[in-house]
Amino acid sequence: MINFKEKVIELIEKEVDSLSHDEISSLIEIPPSYDMGDYAFPVFRLSKAFRKAPNLIAEELATKFANNENFEKIVNNGPYVNFFINKSKLVETVIDGVISEGGNYGSSKIGEGKTVIVEFSSPNIAKPFHIGHIRTTVIGNALYKIYKYLGFNTIAINHLGDYGTQFGMLISAYKKWGDREVIEADPINELLKLYVRFNAEAEEKVELRDEARYWFKELENGNKEAYELWEWIREISLQEFDKVYKMLNIEFDSFAGESFYSDKMPRVIDELNEKGLMKESDGAYLVDLEEYGMPPALIQKRDGSTLYTTRDIAAAFYRKENYDFYKNIYVVGSQQNLHFKQWFKVIELMGHDWAKDCIHIPFGMVSLEDGTLSTRKGRVVSLEDVLNKAVETTLTIMEERNPDLENKEEVAKQVGIGAVVFQELFNQRIKDYVFSWDRTLSFDGETGPYVQYTHARANSLLERGNFNLEDKVNYDLLLSEDEINVVRMVYDFPNIVLDAMEKNEPFFITRQVVEIAKGFNKFYNSSQIIVDDEETKKARLMLTYIVKNTIKIGLGLLGIEAPNKM
RNA sequence: GCACUCGUAGCUCAGCAGGAUAGAGCGACGCCCUCCUAAGGCGUAGGCCGAAGGUUCGACUCCUUUCGAGUGCGCCA
């Protein structure tokens, strides 16, 4: 495909010596409106070197550029040189590009030979998989797909919270009040009950805390009874989580959670000791980070057991050695900003330069209308319920609008779940939000169903119009404002995918896909696509095809399906 | 107390690592199916971009201060 921006840079480079290629590239912008051009080059920076007023410089440059095959017009508008892409060329390059790449439009090989680890989801076993987990799960999955699409060797790791004092509590609670059969009938809820009860009683009886710590210590020491109980709890929890992962269509390459690293910590502690980084404090051991403006990182508790910082460090070492990652990404809430900053620093202090390749991707909090989520206080909304409810609502809408549709159930799942995922990926990660059923179940406007609907509509047009990919198209029949607008957005798509990767922000893709859908719907409403004139029909169907294809790819990168009918 | 994050229309949010007149969706009001999927399209109303300074030819965007909200800060994860 023709890179028009690059063509703009080439032109400018020839006339302007004082700026490098990259400088020019970063100066070039997209005008607020397309009547001002596709690209603009502001010349303010040149006024010193040229010793002229910006307007005059722009005028002079525009005159020099005047004729060029890739641009139909290059003119100055005050201190800007505005470039108008040759529309016919644009249409041609986009259509050719989409046809030749097909289902891989926008993919790339830039990641070849590089491994990216994405750690995400990571729920705590024996606890409900609730609405608070949706962000890491869905954002992480999208990032995983995006990196993969760009050619990286990508590894999805579910770093299960399957270790720590909480399991001491659970084991202790189970031994007191547990009943195997009751738990197996409804694992998460029953385990949660035990956990809640234990915490409640521990408020009064402080000795229970010591008991919990004792059992965790026993677990770490390999006590058979403790280990078997723990293994069983882990297994039944995973089965529960798997239901949600299936609904979301998410797969992991590894479930190596915290427990997996339980025997990999001594070497970390040894290395910290060797390098003189460990400090004793009240019987516990830590790495002092005061110099770096951070509180110390606790490595080992007074009773000799470890903390999650230690496990995270051990896990990072393990991953470096086994995957030799290019990037090691952690999709974890912003509450843990400090924790990651601390242990990344510890690894750096140990002298490992790959510390810089460890990246924390934070996201904002989800809360409920009546306050923060709290497993212990029972203030949770189960993710499974949310997804089921969304599917149900979708089914109701479908009964009204398209009751004759085949495989309604299947489509309702794709649309309902897609709606939830889409909304999750619609804004910047960092924003906090309050969960609301109303918003989650509203499918009008810029939503997942809107985009999917556009996709289905496009598909239906292609079928009705007997679209044939082999048909030659007259590019000059797609030059109206509405048509070009759509073409431009499809043209931008590959760069948007790159942006999403560079900034680890899937929502760039979400927004672009919405823009494409909007543009197409506008076109659809203003022009008849299946018309008598064969040439026109072929051209318009081709436009419909590139829209459908790009939407499908975009949704796919977000982990959302694109049904052909709805 | 210290650190970090957020603060743009009634609501929910975009605004591309400073640029040309601040944009959507929802909600409100008014239109458009004898026509390819109306989960759609078109239009109207609605904003001193939390506040004050500063840097710059130019600030919603960068810096400082300030107010408001959230999060985190040694034996939980």
Image: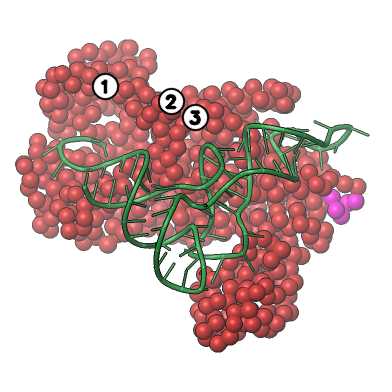
Chain colours: A red, B green
- In the picture, the quarter occupied by the N terminus of chain A is bottom right
Indicate the secondary structure of the residue bearing disc 2: loop
Instruction: Give amino acid for label 1.
Output: Tyr
For marks 3 and 1, give the CA distance: 27 Å
For marks 2 and 1, give the CA distance: 17 Å
Instruction: Give amino acid for label 2.
Output: Ser
The answer to whether A105 is drawn above or below residue A306 in the figure is below
Indicate the secondary structure of the residue bearing disc 1: helix
At 70% from the left and 49% from the top, the residue drawn is A519
Residue at the disc numbered 3: A436
A535 and B45: which one is in front?
B45
A475 and A55: which one is in front?
A55
Q: Give the chain of mark 2.
A: A
Whichever of callouts 2 and 1 sits on the residue coming sooner in the sequence is: 1
Residue A342 x/y as whole percent: 24, 51
Same-chain check, marks 3 and 2 = yes
- In the rendered structure, are the residues bearing label 3 and label 1 in contact, judged by CB atoms less than 8 Å apart? no
Residue at the disc numbered 1: A195
Instruction: Give amino acid for label 3.
Output: Ser
